Image (cartoon, helix red, strand yellow):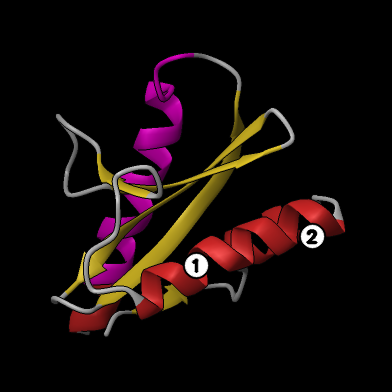
């Protein structure tokens, strides 16, 4: 069984929580449902969780709500812990490189602080 955690920066900010706070209740409800699926299902369809190619171990949680596409980016810490560190509303076909760079930077920060 997997566990989903949210990344927290060194100064105590939680970008995923801030992103969720900016959304409507219905949008947050659907995202929460997808996160629950990730935790409960052993095999998840790529409709909801997919590894991004040409990245430094970044995965995306994929959520569609009333025609709006949301992505939560993160990574695995071990086999069962998913650490989500960045969220945005997707407006283009490809995941923007700047969004991936933010997720990769936060992944490095998380792993460096974890080792300390």
**Is 23 on the left-hand or right-hand side of 103?**
right
Name the residue: 56% across, 47% down: 87
When asked about the image quadrant of residue 39, the answer is: bottom left
Q: Nearer the viewer, mark 1 or mark 2?
A: 1
Q: Secondary structure at mark 2?
A: helix
Q: Main secondary structure of the magenta part?
A: helix
At which x and y percent is residue 65? Answer: 68, 41
Q: Nearer the viewer, residue 77 or 110?
A: 77
Of all residues, the one furthest to the top in this rendering is 93
**Is 36 on the left-hand or right-hand side of 65?**
left
At which x and y percent is residue 107? Answer: 30, 58
**What number is the disc on residue 21?**
2
When asked about the image quadrant of residue 89, the answer is: top right
Name the residue: 32% across, 69% down: 110
Q: Nearer the viewer, residue 115 or 2?
A: 2
The mark nearer the N terminus, 1 or 2, is 2
Q: Nearer the viewer, residue 89 or 48?
A: 48
Name the residue: 22% across, 85% down: 116
Crowd band around label 1 with a 10 angstrom C-alpha radius: few (<14), some (14–19), many (20+): many
**Is 90 on the left-hand or right-hand side of 24?**
left
Q: Quadrant of the N terminus?
A: bottom left
At which x and y percent is residue 82? Answer: 32, 70
**What number is the disc on residue 47?**
none
Numbered range of the magenta stretch: 93-111
The relative height of residue 93 versus residue 12 in the rendered view (above or below) is above
Label 1: which residue? 35
């Amino acid at each position: 069984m997997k566990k989903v955690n949210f990344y927290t920066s060194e100064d105590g900010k939680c970008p995923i929580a801030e992103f969720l706070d900016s959304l409507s209740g219905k949008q947050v409800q659907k995202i929460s449902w997808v996160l629950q699926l990730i935790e409960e299902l052993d095999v998840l369809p790529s409709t909801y969780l997919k590894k991004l190619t040409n990245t430094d171990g970044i995965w995306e949680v994929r959520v569609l709500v009333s025609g709006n596409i949301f992505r939560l980016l993160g990574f695995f810490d071990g086999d069962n812990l998913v650490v989500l560190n960045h969220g945005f509303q997707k407006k283009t076909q490809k995941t923007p490189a700047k969004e991936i760079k933010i997720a990769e930077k936060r992944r490095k920060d998380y792993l460096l602080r974890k080792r300390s």
